[in-house]
Image (cartoon, grey):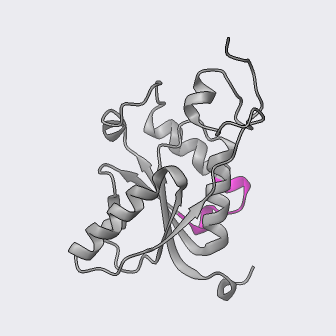
Amino acid sequence: MSRSARPYKLVALGGTFDALHVGHRQLLSEAFKLGDIVLIGVTSDRLVTTLHKKHEVRSFSSRVRDLNRYLETQRWLSRARVTELSEPFGPAARRRKLQALIVSKNTLASGRELNRLRKQNGLQPLDILVVGLLNAADGKPISTTRVRKGEIDLHGRVLRTRS
């Protein structure tokens, strides 16, 4: 796709990216379809501790390594800017040239909060683009929590049924 065919020069998304599942891959794919450059914020180890995850989260370096490997397989690495999120909104709250934020239905409220923060900082609000959640084979949303519990695999295939 030519550079001019993408609607945005700079878009952003963020997350923990612990178990890089098909839902993450869809979010990333949409981001790279929409933006020439994609700013990917990955939650720092310190910030993860404040999120009260229901499962262990791998180290920041492991998560970024796997993310970079995936970006490379998709030939997106040269267009990606991976950054550590040590605060919830990271550089998206300050980047003047940022145009859009890619969110899932679950993180839409955070996107709206980010726009309130940007307005307070005298910056233009971002276009918020919502990517739908993918469901696993059992019809329930794919999530790292479900992968970690052994309910589904990274592709959304059911591994065991709950009794």
Tell whether 100 sits left or right of 118.
Answer: right
Residue 99 seen anywhere in this rendered image of the structure: yes
Residue 136 position in % (x across, y down) = 73, 37
Q: Say how many tags the image has.
A: 0
Residue 84 position in % (x across, y down) = 39, 51
Identified at 78% across, 35% down, the residue is 137
| Quarter location, residue 140 | top right
Residue 24 position in % (x across, y down) = 62, 48
Q: In the depicted view, which residue is nearer to us: 130 or 33?
A: 130
**Given the current orientation, which residue lies at the most extreme top position?**
163
Q: State whether residue 31 is above or below residue 132.
A: below
Identified at 48% across, 65% down, the residue is 12
Q: Which residues are magenta?
A: 71-80
Which image quarter is the N terminus in? Answer: bottom right
Q: In the depicted view, which residue is nearer to us: 128 or 32?
A: 128
Q: In the depicted view, which residue is nearer to us: 28 or 126?
A: 126
**Given the current orientation, which residue lies at the most extreme bottom position?**
4
Question: What predominant SS class does the magenta segment belong to?
Answer: helix
Which image quarter is the C terminus in? Answer: top right
Q: State whether residue 127 is above or below residue 19.
A: below
Identified at 21% across, 73% down, the residue is 120
Q: Is residue 23 magenta?
A: no
| Quarter location, residue 77 | bottom right
| Quarter location, residue 6 | bottom right
Identified at 63% across, 29% down, the residue is 147
Residue 53 position in % (x across, y down) = 42, 30
Q: In the depicted view, which residue is nearer to us: 104 or 2?
A: 104
Residue 69 seen anywhere in this rendered image of the structure: no
